[in-house]
Amino acid sequence: MIDVQDLTKQYAGRTAVDRLTFQVEPGQIVGFLGPNGAGKSTTMRILSGFMPPTSGRATVNGFDVFHDSIAVRKSIGYMPEMAPLYTDMRVKEYLRFRAELKGLSGRAMRHRVGEVMELCTVSDVRRRLIGHLSKGFRQRVALADALLHKPPLLILDEPTNGLDPVQIRQVRELLTNLKPAHTILLSTHILQEVEAVCDRVLMIHHGRILANETPDKLTRGLRAASVVQIEIQAKGDDVLTKLEALPNVRKATQDAEQDGWRMISLRVEARQDVREALMDLVLKQNWKLRELHRQLPSLEDVFVELAAADRAK
Amino acid sequence: MRLLWVLFKKELRAFFVSPVAYVVLALIMVLSGYSFRAALSILERGPSEGSIVQWMFQPNWFWLSYFFTFPLLTMRLFAEEKKMGTFETLFTTPVHTWQVVLSKYLASVFVYAILWLPSYINFHLVDWITAGQVAIPPGSLKGSYLILLAMGLFNLSIGCFASSLTSNQIIAAVVSFSASLLHFLGGLFIMVLGRKVSETFVDITNYFVSMEHIRTFTSGLIDTRPLVYYSSLSVLFLILTHQVLEFRRWKP
């Protein structure tokens, strides 16, 4: 669906996107992940045909974004960052205007506008001026706009930005429901979002790809250390030293103590499991244990680690 | 063609949901009403040379005030979309840049044409009230409104161009006002210098300054040269506007 080869974009004296190469298969939801200023929006603007790349090539649905711009625009629904809209129009009016621009007309257009308003739960505000709507509603009007012409590819720049938790969940459900028929490329800097909806993660930092994996593989196959949290009843100052003496335990720290129960976190070497050895130690020492929990590294940890590795290079 | 119509409707609507069209309409009605009254007062003084149409359109101050309309009508067109970021949504739909430029320009021309309707009606009112006693030469009337339209096409295209250059409406307004006014003042300059410069210079300048065009058209002489001159300049500025907007797509 998307094929990007060596895509580079330079602004005066600054490289926003640096030799990006990736593919997106049809029917996937791909999360574009990275901190602010990583080059996500720039890449999306290039893919939508709004800006040309400095060098490199990108095709969408088989059309070159530069040479076949109109054909590309017909195959994408693009929602820019911050959801810019005409604030002096009413919701329904705006969507009808947009639908007509995208080639719909007559009864089919009116029907489709009603449909996307339902889908994005903006039917209740259809007569309101867009300028008077809250951020969350505007965001969903922009999303409804992107869906109007049933494009095979949706490019959404931070679709859940500015929404409240309930609305975020609604949008995520909506995206998951769209999945079989639509390919979705969405950008975000919220890691849970990627974990919740995406089939694949494209991690980008300083305009370069750090990782291109499934969220699962990314967290599992990581070098980042995992953490085991325990709550034990044990006396003595050498408890932490004894825990640290276990193989593969990097560091033990006591987070809190309450009624004689000590909450301790153990940082464990990557891809190692210390839980059995830990249990043995607890039994041998005659400690009491009431909680044992292994925390896998989040995408956040992965990101921090990959970014650090990238800097080191 | 269909897209052009869709865009045109939207632009026209934008003029009438915001106060802009009404403010400009009120401005033009006051100014042209005043000019009209001044022309009538000449009539009250007794028989004199010329016609009420010429008295209304020939004084320079009528034209000076007239230049306020162009920045008001055009400053918003592109600058606002740039500022709001709606260019991004607009140009990621399958529209061509020329369709956007033309629709915005035509909408402003349409509003501009509406602005002059009340003053046109004024002449017919006088004709009706005085039962045809006041001479309103039809050629002179047609010529006046034709030159008004031709100069409008030109100045609105300058306004479009100015608006495409910036995301700041004030800057767009200042640029278009200055450009329109400078072009017009060139004519006044020649009038003031009069015979101090060589005749050939005056003749050549008269081809491209408005003063002479206004004089001939308001006397009922319809000359095709100024019409071609103003429409080709309008096309030129629309092409420039198009290039400014297209530049975004080519800038490496």
Image: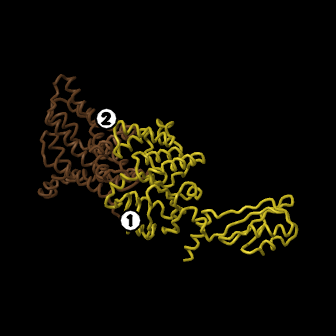
Chain colours: A yellow, B brown
Label 2 with label 1: CB-CB less than 8 Å: no
B130 w.r.t. B166: above or below? above
Q: Which of A12 and A211 is in front in this view?
A: A211
Left/right placement of residue B130 relative to residue B18 reads left
Write down the residue under mark 2.
Answer: B29
The Cα atoms of the two marked residues, 2 and 1, are separated by 50 Å
Q: What residue is shown at x 38% (from left), y 59% (from top)?
A: A60
Q: Nearer the viewer, mark 2 or mark 1?
A: 1
Element under disc 2: helix
Q: Nearer the viewer, residue B76 or B145?
A: B76
Percent position (x, y) of residue A215? Answer: 56, 61
Q: What amino acid is labelled 1 in the image?
A: Pro
Residue B19 seen from this side: yes
Q: Which chain carries label 1?
A: A
Percent position (x, y) of residue B27? Answer: 34, 38
Q: Residue A53 carries which label?
A: 1
Q: Which chain carries label 2?
A: B
A164 w.r.t. B120: above or below? below
B152 w.r.t. B132: above or below? below
Left/right placement of residue A282 relative to residue B20 reads right
Percent position (x, y) of residue B86? Answer: 41, 50
A104 w.r.t. B162: above or below? above
Tell me which corner region of the image, top left, top right, bottom left or bottom right, holds residue B113.
top left
Element under disc 1: loop
Q: What amino acid is labelled 2 in the image?
A: Met
Q: Residues within 10 Å of mark 1 (few under 14, many from 20)?
A: many
Q: How crowded is mark 2: few (under 14 residues within 10 Å), some or many (20 or more)?
A: some
Q: Nearer the viewer, residue A281 or A80?
A: A281
Percent position (x, y) of residue A313? Answer: 54, 77
